[in-house]
């Protein structure tokens, strides 16, 4: 039983998986009624009026609104688990508090959820952590550690409910931009306030996520102590294939078009059913009062209309001048204000060789084309590039096509070449959205040196065929046969994750032999960790960095 200031929450123990877990704990008040499109508010008391009611936390929670019919606005919950323990067993000063991992789910900021069933997500990582061996507590780099990890899985608002941009939102004192990111921040504040009740160390917190979960990591890194008014809530960051789409200012034409289109589809625009919505206030009031299903359908229609259009942009974080102060390409540059440097000790980002191809119109891969009008011809590639990056000058586009990503070229130094429009476009998309953002986060992270103190900068590439978006998750996400049939990669990859979560250093508890590479510190060596079929090696980053340097130089016009 966990006794928090706002309620008593009953967890459970699974003898089958040897974990103690809580599946459902509210971390904020339900964002319903006037709290729609507003920053998360403190959780409601579960023990009001002197009640000693025990909240059953051994139940899954609903998704936030998404897709066609499922989900509830009352969705701001989290779950957590670790090896067996009780709050009373962690009260002894001789027992070290345990490192904490807050995991943000993916789903393109449009869909997804964090509720878990048994065995929970990331359980394969716990199985290769030092808690799965007989190793006792000790010290790494002079700091006491516990051979265990607390994993936390929250859910946050998505699509229009979590990322509605526009001047209407900014100008309304009862609304906020980027509320999905503010939900995540509220989770981290909850960890700061309550994790010691669960035996967690608030000074050893890692944020982790894959895809939009990785993009969420980047967003939280940007907002982690980014001003003197904001408390630093975590120390480490691991972004897997971080989905960091174009990040416009909240009132840029592309962002404002989303608000206007969404309001129109919901019947709250000037030409909608609510004919009186002629001012910004009444338009937003209409949206706040509209049925959930109406907003869900309008949000889905906006998402569908932006699948492969020229901007390739839909619901996503925006520069709001409060939480996200400026684009990542600017905030992570050496010329940024010291206030905006990325305030974390250790950072690691992973990417997959061909994952950009998941986000392309499939017509680019064949001569017959597709319904979007794309095919594998050079002319079609040029059409795609112009539509995807309209802000580049002709000189810059020529540099992209002839120098950085020529018709026949290389992917990375270690991987080999390409000669198709599909792979070429995939690399451009991968680098601008999934790879360079992670690299910039890692390069700009704090600390220095990858020793036992856990302050390092790490980059890695997964190249095992097909190396598409999500191909690497089989080694660490859910229990499956791959973790037994490919034990080397499982222990080398998931084991490095576990070591990073526990110490900030992916090599502190290296499980593979001396014939397999560890994860090199990028700042110290200029090298990255490369996962190949049946081997773990290191590879150069010069080609990738030259491309990312270019994308950074034009970042504000993409914008990223």
Image (cartoon, rainbow, N blue to C red):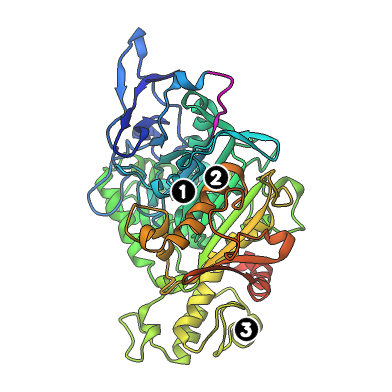
Task: Please state which of the two labelled residues, at mark 3 or mark 2, is closer to the viewer.
Answer: 2
**Span of residues in magenta:** 92-98
Badge 2 marks a residue whose secondary structure is: helix
Tell me residue 109's x, y (percent): 42, 54
Q: Closer to the N terminus: mark 2 or mark 1?
A: 1
Residue drawn where x is 40% and y is 35% of the image? 81
What x and y, as percent, mark residue 129? Answer: 49, 45
Residue drawn at point x = 52 percent, y = 60 percent: 244
Of residues 417 and 63, the one drawn nearer to the viewer in this rendering: 417
Q: CA distance from mark 3 to mark 1?
A: 51 Å
- Helix, strand or loop for the magenta stretch, by majority: loop
Q: CA distance from mark 2 to mark 1?
A: 12 Å
Q: Secondary structure at mark 1?
A: loop
Q: Is residue 222 left or right of residue 85?
A: right
The question of residue 478 being in magenta is answered with no
Q: Which residue is mark 2?
A: 501
Residue 97 or residue 62, whichever sits in front? 97
> Would you name the residue on which mark 3 appears?
394
Can residue 560 be seen here?
A: no
| Residue identified by numbered label 1 | 128
Percent of width and height locating residue 227: 68, 40
| The N terminus sits in image quarter | top left
């Amino acid at each position: 039983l966990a006794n928090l200031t706002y309620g008593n929450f009953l967890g459970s123990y699974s003898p089958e998986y040897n974990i103690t877990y809580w599946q459902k704990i509210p971390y904020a008040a339900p964002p319903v009624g006037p709290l729609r499109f507003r920053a998360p508010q403190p959780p409601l008391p579960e023990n009001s009026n002197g009640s000693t009611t025990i909240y059953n936390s051994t139940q899954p929670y609903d998704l936030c609104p998404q897709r066609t019919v499922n989900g509830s606005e009352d969705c701001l919950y989290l779950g957590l688990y670790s090896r067996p323990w009780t709050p009373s067993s962690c009260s002894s000063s001789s027992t070290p508090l345990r490192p904490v991992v807050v995991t943000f789910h993916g789903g393109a900021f449009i869909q997804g959820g964090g509720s878990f069933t048994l065995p929970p997500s990331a359980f394969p990582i716990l199985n290769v952590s030092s808690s799965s061996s007989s190793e006792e507590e000790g010290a790494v780099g002079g700091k006491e550690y516990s051979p265990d990890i607390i994993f936390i899985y929250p859910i946050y608002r998505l699509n229009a409910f979590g990322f509605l941009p526009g001047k209407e939102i900014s100008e309304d004192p009862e609304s906020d931009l980027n509320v999905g990111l503010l939900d995540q921040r509220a989770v981290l504040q909850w960890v700061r306030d309550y994790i010691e009740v669960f035996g967690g160390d608030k000074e050893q917190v890692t944020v982790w996520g894959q895809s939009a979960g990785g993009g969420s990591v980047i967003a939280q890194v940007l907002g982690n102590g980014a001003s003197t008014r904001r408390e630093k809530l975590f120390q480490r960051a691991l972004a897997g294939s971080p989905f960091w789409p174009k990040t416009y200012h909240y009132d840029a034409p592309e962002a404002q078009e989303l608000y206007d289109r969404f309001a129109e589809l919901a019947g709250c625009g000037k030409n909608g059913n609510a004919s009186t919505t002629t001012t910004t206030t009444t338009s937003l009031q209409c949206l706040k009062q509209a049925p959930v299903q109406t907003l869900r359908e309008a949000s889905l229609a906006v998402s569908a209309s932006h699948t492969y259009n020229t901007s390739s942009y839909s619901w996503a974080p925006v520069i709001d001048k409060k939480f996200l102060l400026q684009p990542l390409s600017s905030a992570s540059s050496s010329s940024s204000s010291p206030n905006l440097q990325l305030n974390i000790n250790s950072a690691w980002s992973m990417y997959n060789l061909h994952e950009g191809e998941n986000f392309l119109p499939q017509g680019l891969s064949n001569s017959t084309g597709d319904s979007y009008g794309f095919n594998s011809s050079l002319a079609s590639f040029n059409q795609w590039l112009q539509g995807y990056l309209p802000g580049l000058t002709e000189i810059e586009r020529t540099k992209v096509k002839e120098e950085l990503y020529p018709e026949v070229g290389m992917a990375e130094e270690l991987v080999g070449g390409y000669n198709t429009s599909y792979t070429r476009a995939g690399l451009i998309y991968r680098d601008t959205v999934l790879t360079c953002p992670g690299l910039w986060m890692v390069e700009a992270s704090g600390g220095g040196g990858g020793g036992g103190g856990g302050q390092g900068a790490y980059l890695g590439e997964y190249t095992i065929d097909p190396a598409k978006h999500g191909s690497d998750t089989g080694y660490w996400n859910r229990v499956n046969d791959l973790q037994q049939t490919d034990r080397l990669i499982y222990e080398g990859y998931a084991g490095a994750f576990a070591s990073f979560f526990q110490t900030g250093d992916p090599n502190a508890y290296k499980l593979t032999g001396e014939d397999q590479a560890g994860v090199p510190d990028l700042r110290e060596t200029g090298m990255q960790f490369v996962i190949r079929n049946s081997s773990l090696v290191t590879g150069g980053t010069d080609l990738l960095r030259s491309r990312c340097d270019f994308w950074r130089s034009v970042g504000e016009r993409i914008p990223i």
